[in-house]
Amino acid sequence: MALFRKAGESFIGGKFMVYGQTGSGKSKFTLTFPKIGAIDTEAGLSNYEGHPNLIFVANTSSYKEVEEAVDEIEESLMKEIETFVVDSETKIYDNMQIVCLDVEEKRAKSKGGEIDDTNLSVRSWGRIKNLTKRLQSAKIDLSSKGIFIVSTAQSSDVTKQVGGERVVVGEKAESHKSLPFDYDVVLRFFVEEKIEKGKKTAHYTAEVLKDRTSTFNKFDIIDNPSFEMWKPYYDAKKKNGACIQTSYKQAVVKDEDAIVEEDKTIDESKSKLKEIIALGDEHKKQVVAIYREVGIKNAGEITTNKLALRVMELAKAYLEENQIASEE
């Protein structure tokens, strides 16, 4: 199967990530996008139901249900929506941590440990990272079919030690740290107070932290941001190009299967070496000879499928020779 395609004009739905403090205009920004199917993790979008752009809403903070929602869009809603909104990624990230901590506590309890002392292990953090990546792959596949992706997140302060105190030096999105890398446009929302005719008003703005479309430059400040600002770019793309077909979600499954199969082959190769050793001490030198032949020092260095297959080939050949010799 050919992996490469001819490079040319193509249309994919833009991927937008916006974060900021509560009340900074994130949800209102998402509603400027067309024909929205939204994941509402905080019941916040319920205040906007009835908005003409909001077509479908699913209330959940479950990672698994968000993944199922993506599947539902691909299977039956592609002609009805143009934008997939997750409001917010923070709640999904928090929920992943809660679930993994519950698992850790149950594991500690089963081993007689102290539940109160339980923290997320390196293994659990690795699992959260993998789940985040899998969900992002599903969203990217959706965008490649022409669906806009808009994710919101809450923000928290970034601090550093200055003298004897911690000083706030910026803000970051409350989500997995890898999340912003997957988006075409990343905006930090904030509200400024303005006095107009003696009346205090809220002025909604956003700082551009990333824009692959080159509609804005990094660090530009946008007043009252909306999808209309990026619409000309995507309209031109849609006019001149066709959607592309990606399978990043399936690639994860394919790679998982490949790793399982590779581990199986590695275990089988080591098993064949043990069969040689079991023939007696005089046969152990053959195991060393196989190590030398493939360029390793011990079985622990059999870490690739190619290496394992070669070890297995040499070991099987030796075992077959010895079986024939014993029969004679």
Image: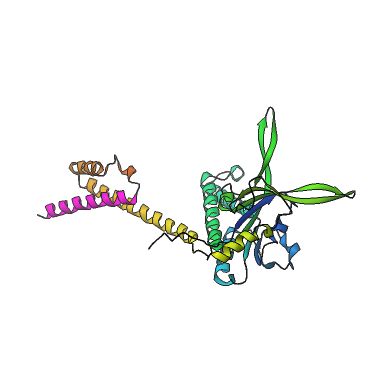
State the residue at coordinates (59%, 62%). 236
Question: In the image, is residue 310 part of the stretch drawn in magenta?
Answer: yes
Q: Quadrant of the N terminus?
A: bottom left
Question: In the image, is residue 137 part of the stretch drawn in magenta?
Answer: no
Quadrant of residue 163 within the rendered picture: top right
Q: Quadrant of the C terminus?
A: bottom left
Give the residues in magenta. 303-328
Q: Position of residue 118 (x, y in %)?
A: 58, 44
Q: Position of residue 239 (x, y in %)?
A: 57, 66
State the residue at coordinates (66%, 31%). 161
Farthest residue to the right: give it. Answer: 198
Q: Look at the image and tell me whether residue 68 can be seen.
A: no
State the residue at coordinates (40%, 54%). 259
Q: Position of residue 174 (x, y in %)?
A: 64, 48
In the rendered view, how is the structure colored? rainbow
Farthest residue to the left: give it. Answer: 328
* Left/right of residue 207 with respect to residue 106 in the rendered view: right
- Along the viewing direction, whichever of 223 and 147 lies nearer the viewer: 223
Above/below status of 297 relative to 144: above
